[in-house]
Image: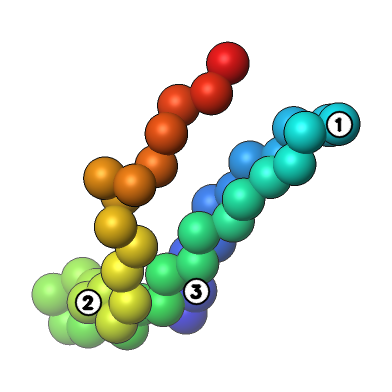
């Protein structure tokens, strides 16, 4: 399954961070990752 949170600001732009996860008996396992230390807060 995919997890795709995103934010879109009219007149500015947006971003969507896509993660791919596998559902397991114990919960889930992320198969991809995004370096969250590179995200910046705007506004």
First of labels 3, 2 by sequence position: 3
* C-alpha separation, residue under disc 1 versus residue under disc 3: 27 Å
Across and down, in percent, residue 2 comes to: 49, 74
Q: Secondary structure at mark 3?
A: strand
According to the picture, the residue beneath numbered tag 1 turns out to be 11
- What is the residue that sits farthest to the right in this orientation? 11
Q: Position of residue 6 (x, y in %)?
A: 60, 49
Quadrant hosting residue 11: top right
User: How packed is label 1: few (under 14 Cα within 10 Å), some, or many (20 or more)?
Assistant: few
Q: Nearer the viewer, residue 34 or 24?
A: 34
Q: Residue at x 34, y 47 (%)?
A: 38
Q: Is residue 23 left or right of residue 6?
A: left
Task: Tell which tag, 1 or 2, sits nearer the viewer.
Answer: 1
Left or right placement of residue 33 versus residue 42 in this view: left
Q: Which residue is mark 3?
A: 2
From the image, tell me which residue sits under label 2.
Answer: 29
Whether label 1 touches label 3, CB < 8 Å: no
Residue under the point 42% across and 34% down? 40
Give the structural element (helix, strand or loop) at label 1: loop
């Amino acid at each position: 399954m995919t997890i795709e949170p995103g934010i879109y600001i009219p007149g500015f732009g947006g971003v969507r961070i896509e993660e791919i996860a596998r559902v397991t008996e114990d919960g889930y396992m992320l198969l991809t990752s995004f370096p969250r230390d590179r995200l910046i807060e705007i506004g």
